[in-house]
Image (spheres, coloured by chain):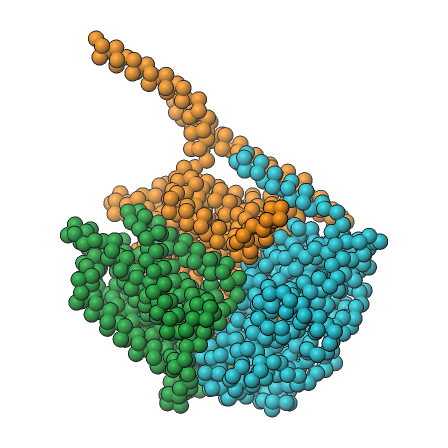
Chain colours: A orange, B cyan, C green
Amino acid sequence: MTNPKIKKKDRALTVSWIVVAAVYAAVFAAEQVISPNSMLFTVLKKGATYALVAVSMNLLNGFTGIFSLGQAGFMLLGAYTYAIFTIPLEHRSSVYQYFNGGVVQFTLPWFLAMILAGLVAAFFAWLIGLPVLRLKSDYLAIATLGFAEIIRAILQWNQLGPVTNGSNMLRLFPNFNSFNILKADGSVAVYLSTTVPFLIAGVCIGLIVLLLHSGYGRAFKSIRDDEVAAEAMGVNLAHHKQLAFCISSFFAGVGGAMLAMYQTTVQAKSFTTAMTYEILLMVVIGGVGSVTGSVISSFLFVACSEWWLRFLDNEQFIGDFQVPLLRNGFRLVVFSIIIMVVVLFFRRGIMGTRELPDVIRALPGAVRSLPEKMRARRERRSASRKEAGR
Amino acid sequence: MKKFVAILLAAMMLLSVSAMAENIVKIGVYEPASGDSGAGGKQETLGVQYANLETPTVVIGGEEYKVELVYADNGSSTDKAPSAAQELVSAGVSVVLGSYGSGVSIAGSEYFKNANIPAIGLTCTNPQVTAGNSHYFRVCFLDPFQGTVLANYAFSTLGARTAYCLAELGNDYDVGLVTYFKQAFEDLGGTVISDTFPTNNSDFTSYLTNAAMYGADVFFCPVSIAYSTQILQQAASQGVEFPILGGDTLDSNVVAAAAVGTNIDLTIDTFYQEGANAAFDEGFKAWLNSDATALANNGGNDTISAVSVMGYDGYYVALEALKAAGTTDSAAVMAVLPSIEYTGVTGLIKFDENGDAVRTSAFVKKVNNETGAWEFVTEQTVE
Amino acid sequence: MWNTVFPYLLSGISVGGQYALIAIGYTMVYGILRLINFAHGDVFMVAGIIMVYMSASGMPLWVTIPLVLILTALIGFVIERVAYKPLRSAPRMSVMISAIGVSYTLQNLVLYVTGGLNKTYPTIPLISQTVTVLGAKTKAVTLVTPVLTLVLVLLLVTLINKTKIGMAMRAVSKDFETSQLMGIKINSVISATFVIGSFLAGVGSVLYFTNYPTVIQTSGAMPGLKAFVAAVFGGIGSIPGAVIGAFIIGIMENIIKGLDVILFKSGVISAPLGLSTFSDAFTFALLIVILIVKPTGLFGEKATDKV
């Protein structure tokens, strides 16, 4: 057990854990110190939600090689399941105003509803997967996209109104702010409205990482690399694809529930293919096949679109000079150009297929060992010169 | 990662520094500037801007404050609404005006509530906006009232017995108003058939055919400006025979322009009739004609939309509240809002226990197919 | 019964013809590059926006229409050169993502230019007039569309079967690499495909927006998706298949919108069920069924491998 290689790997892992813990500590601390009205928390909450969804999409598209575009549909199922089962009874008559309070007359605790959200999404994924997973590449993509649209239409159908509230908004369910611990007078004692979503997303992403490191994960990757070879090696293709599809959808469902909590209202109308495309772009920018990449790019994506690039939408003056072009919508133009540049010129994205421990391993190690390597090379060169001279 | 955190912290410091300027009170304008309701949102914003131009300062607690309007575009969509609302909250506004469209108002509501910021709805007519909360107020009438007015008009004046209603799927305003219209119309003894179309639909020919097939006497479509113009154009080319009825969203010169040169009978109800307050009309028109951007935002001509008038009145209600609170603190403004009374261009505004303005009358207008102007039909009152 | 169904058929045929003109672009590009060109629907929308701005600048229609068609073809060409050509050797998923990126960019550009507001499409005389067909009133464009579509398709099929570039296209779509080895200039063939596809989308946009005269940045998304579904339905790579698929999709979609009425009138149901909610979803349901039952579509070539 004294293999230095393993020891080094362990060190990288430990450092990764420390980094992750530090991020959580920083988030928790920031939440206690900075005003809750800051855009920072909007970005962190939405970022955590999208990080989970992007990682779940990456599990499918990046690690298993199944090109699915149904993410928005599964998020929609999750969001609706969560909302329907958590709206407090006293609010039901006002939310389901056109349907006499709806038929669901009980509530579940938020974490049960969240798990149920995942299960419902996974169940529908299983149903859809039976016929669809036999299709290949872009046919699969377009079929899953179609299913997402069908799910959206069904949930909007007025005849299902007593359950889904028709096409109308679901609201007044517990949201992220419900996690704050209140004092007796109603003011906030401990802010947790950002930390808890971070924890939920963190646990889910952790489970996905564990899965990827298990035998299943290796089977998924072998399917991505070569289906025929994988099958020859004894990987049951249908079974493993179905499994990856259901698991990915489970987490997309949980992500949908988190999105509902973030938005405080949910409506089927907004879960369009454009949403799936956005998540896909996050995966690509982060690096297809890197969990760390998806997480980082989700936060960057949300921060850019919600916060950092906002100034581009308003007229700006430098002294008396009015900066040209800036008006409503310019932010999105700049943003889409950045995306095109990444897609065309940085095809591997931010991380490629590397993960956080890989980066840590590369960082100090590379710096420290560089002089050593150079010395070694110099010695080798002088040795060979000596030999040549002889 | 460290760098990332450092950048974040730096950005936040910048934000907090810029928020510390002296004697400025911020009013949030939470309106769609893009999307299906973009045209309406811009017209509503015009009213606020005009009022701000007219009265750019307010005396709060003995000191003069400059009123700064902070805009956030909610894109007419409920999923863009949260970040737009949060943007206003983080800008530190004392009170929010808006939004055009009930759905986005409801979607932003929770964010204002959490930050203890009061919001004054200008033309969002769905009861759900103010029901069950103490931070959302509104200066316009409500859908149950509006639905009744329209149903009475359709049944009594138009003599309709079968009504076909069309709403956009997932638009709380449309669906709500259709529901209240249906209730009222059926109570009168009529029959109602309602249909919905998906967002981004542009082919309404089959829906118009549906109405004709059911033998509808009136076609009720309280939809966004974007859809109503298309419905009118397609109805004209299909040569429909039934009159078309709309809610307050259709009160726009853009919609009226779509009916010019056709033989469509278009009637709507709304908050204000041009000519009711000559001084306001004159001033507003003069401003529109002097400002090219404003004129473009108003759809290219100087017809006054009722939503602009509501924006104008809403701004003054907000100023009254700031004066009464004596501070720019949003919680204090919220506390005094229920007791505010203000007589504006659209009459007396005072809030009931839900935070809704007490309104008992609506104007019914009809489009002139030659000039594209709205002509006054009647002022309908329901108790 | 016939009187009840006929108006829906009429709407369906009209919109079907417009889908067909878009679907051809999808099917040709897919036939050659095996790429779902997600940006194609947005090219269609951009053609509409260009038309709006050009006619607002006061140019007469006989200038604007040809100019719009040429510009649309040019946009198709540029998109291919900028966004797809650099990725020729990359995995197919990268190209598809690039297509999604282009779609996103075009939509956002139009959002910026228009300020996110609906633009009204100019009225084109002759085809905007109201005509009466068997008792149903409609715009003349409804009748012009299927005819024009068929004429254009015949021209296109002739081009593909009789000319040199057409032969090259057929060769490239059969075997990309071999045709390259045989000396076919692959890049010019692909460019020609994009130019033709975008040109037809431009024609489609003139017809479509004359019928439904409002353009906004999302106007291209749904027609684009449906046209793609039509292409798959008809058998992707097959031009007649795409056209027939488009007409079927257009008609079915309008029948669904009127299904409540049809069922109600024929006494099957006693009250409307709100089935028009499914007018878009039905298109996709049809797609999934055809993909599962006959993955190559109605007229698709028998593909040995669709990896």
Q: Is residue B333 left or right of residue B107?
A: right
Q: Residue furthest right?
A: B62
Above or below, A181 relative to B180: above
Q: Nearer the viewer, residue A157 or C155?
A: C155
Quarter of image, res C228: bottom left
Q: Where is B285 relative to B148, above or below?
A: above
Residue pictured at 40% horizontal, 74% vertical: C61
Residue at 48% in and 66% down: C216
Q: Position of residue B180 (x, y in %)?
A: 63, 77
Q: Position of residue A143 (x, y in %)?
A: 36, 61
Does residue A197 appear anywhere in the picture? Answer: no
Q: Residue furthest top?
A: A390
User: Which residue shows up at 44% across the image and 44% down it?
Assistant: A286
Q: Say above or below: B102 vs B181.
A: above
Q: Residue A31 in the image: state x and y as whole percent.
A: 64, 42
Q: Residue at x 32, y 48 (%)?
A: C86
Q: Residue furthest left?
A: C182
Q: Split into 4 quadrants, where in the image is the N terminus of chain C?
A: bottom left
In this orientation, which residue lies closer to the viewer: B12 or C263? B12
User: Depth check: B207 or A180 in front?
Assistant: B207
Q: Is residue B139 visible?
A: yes
Q: Is residue B200 left or right of residue A239?
A: right
Vertical comparison of A297 with C132: above or below: above
